[in-house]
């Protein structure tokens, strides 16, 4: 036996990590469950029926995946894909200037971008990032992986969940080692957009030497021109992250992007693994960003917005459903659940979460442990049939839990942790 000891050999911050868990570990996609937990696009990818047809007559209209070229490494630069992303985001709503492929980094989902930015700017064991809870869990996971400290400045209370600009500026003045501020707009799990003026105040901080990152994962469900991507031409310290996983319904291809200054983009592109974007991924994304793909995306978006409105009309009619706690600019909604006394209640929310999944095959997310989300479930907007089943299931489950005084599970605390410990 040699001297190897994993406990002393591996980095202590890595040893402390818990393996990634998601609600799918407990409630599988077996074709009968409806999955309203991960904010995926219920209406599917931005591909036309002809694009995915296996019939040879339709082949020319689909994504250009060169299967017999798969023995070759993919394009390390992805300029065609980047140009399409620029075309999409050069709205000239926030500036007259144009972003070009030199303003872009593309990665394996925005999760690669979150990590890449941290590795680019934060010295492990010394530097910190600032996050504004409730927010996307991956920022803190990446911070732990990179041994980077976490400063939390919670958002102002629901339902607006605005930035606490004064407190953020104070933290940036007092903590010299904060390098990055991760903002999420519209927020996850809040669904609320951040005010452009608030972001500008942070960008203009007179003494802080760091970068503001705006995660726009859900921006395609927001009103037109919401994206600040082109604004990076005006601010050397701004990075805007986007993903093809949500509005474009392409979570399976793992493509995320960072729009930023040419100088920061150069750093990110120098750091990355040379062939990080698989060629099938870029071929599918190029199709999704083509006129045909964009037309599918817009049509799916309209369907999701219609179902989102249906949920907003239907949920308040159900006994035991409380207030909408966030905004309405994403493909999910954050709602309070109430106990018999009409008060928001985490025990009720957790019991409903579990019963929906276990008895009715409807998987949503319990968010009651997140800052400012007491008693809340986050519900991804589904298809019309899914929304119908969800509304019926929720009404019946709430009645079981509240009217019939169903006891909550014994190992409640354990389940609560499990329900909260997932990242998406
Ligand atoms: C706010 C936010 N950012 C980023 C991501 C991850 O996106 P990707 O699939 O591109 O890694 C998610 C996924 O849920 C998210 O909610």
Image: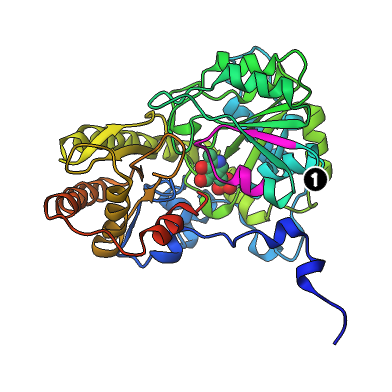
Residue 2 percent across, percent down from the top left: 87, 83
Residue 317 can be seen, yes or no: yes
Residue 138 in magenta stretch: yes
**Mark 1 vs ligand 1: CB under 8 Å?**
no
Residue lying farthest to the bottom in this orientation: 1
Percent x, y for residue 288? 53, 43
Q: Is residue 162 left or right of residue 384?
A: right
Q: Residue at x 55, y 17 (%)?
A: 196
Q: Position of residue 182 (x, y in %)?
A: 63, 33
| Range of magenta residues | 128-142
**What is the quadrant of the N terminus in the image?**
bottom right
Quarter of the displayed picture in which ligand 1 can be seen = top right
Figure check: 87 above or below 26: above
Q: How is the image coloured?
A: rainbow
In-image side of 349 versus 189 (left or right): left
User: Residue 374 versus residue 89: which sits nearer the camera?
Assistant: 374
């Amino acid at each position: 036996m040699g001297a190897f000891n994993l406990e002393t050999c591996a980095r202590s911050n890595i040893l402390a990590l818990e393996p990634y868990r998601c609600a799918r570990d407990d409630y599988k996609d077996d074709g009968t469950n409806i999955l309203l937990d991960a904010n995926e696009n219920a209406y599917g990818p931005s591909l036309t029926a002809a694009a995915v047809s296996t019939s040879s007559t339709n082949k020319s209209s689909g994504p250009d995946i060169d299967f017999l070229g798969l023995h070759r490494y993919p394009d390390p630069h992805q300029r065609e894909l980047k140009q399409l992303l620029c075309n999409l985001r050069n709205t000239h709503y926030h500036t007259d200037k144009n972003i070009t492929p030199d303003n872009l980094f593309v990665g394996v989902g925005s999760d690669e971008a979150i990590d890449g930015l941290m590795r680019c700017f934060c010295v492990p064991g010394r530097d910190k990032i600032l996050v504004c809870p409730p927010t996307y869990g991956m920022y803190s996971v990446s911070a732990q992986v990179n041994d980077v400290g976490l400063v939390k400045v919670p958002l102002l209370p629901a339902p607006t969940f605005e930035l606490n600009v004064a407190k953020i500026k104070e933290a940036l003045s007092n903590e010299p080692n904060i390098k990055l501020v991760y903002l999420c707009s519209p927020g996850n799990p809040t669904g609320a957009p951040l005010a452009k003026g608030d972001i500008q105040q942070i960008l203009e901080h007179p003494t802080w030497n760091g970068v503001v990152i705006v995660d726009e994962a859900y921006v395609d469900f927001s009103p037109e021109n919401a994206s600040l991507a082109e604004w990076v031409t005006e601010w050397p310290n701004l990075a805007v992250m986007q993903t093809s996983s949500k509005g474009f319904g392409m979570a399976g291809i793992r493509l995320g992007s960072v729009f930023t200054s040419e100088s920061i983009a150069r750093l990110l592109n120098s750091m990355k693994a040379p062939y990080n974007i698989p060629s099938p991924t870029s071929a599918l994304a190029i199709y999704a960003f083509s006129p045909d793909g964009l037309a599918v995306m817009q049509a799916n978006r309209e369907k999701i917005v219609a179902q989102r409105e249906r949920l907003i009309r239907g949920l308040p009619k159900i006994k035991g459903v409380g207030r909408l706690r966030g905004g309405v600019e994403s493909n999910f909604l954050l709602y309070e659940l109430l106990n018999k006394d009409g008060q928001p209640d985490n025990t009720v929310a957790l019991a409903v979460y579990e019963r929906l999944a276990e008895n009715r095959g409807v998987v949503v997310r319990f968010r009651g442990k997140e800052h400012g989300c007491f008693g809340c479930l986050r519900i991804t907007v589904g298809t019309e049939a899914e929304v119908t089943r969800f509304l019926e299931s929720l009404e019946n489950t709430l009645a079981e839990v509240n009217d019939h005084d169903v006891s909550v599970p014994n190992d409640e605390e354990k389940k609560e942790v499990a329900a909260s410990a997932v990242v998406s």
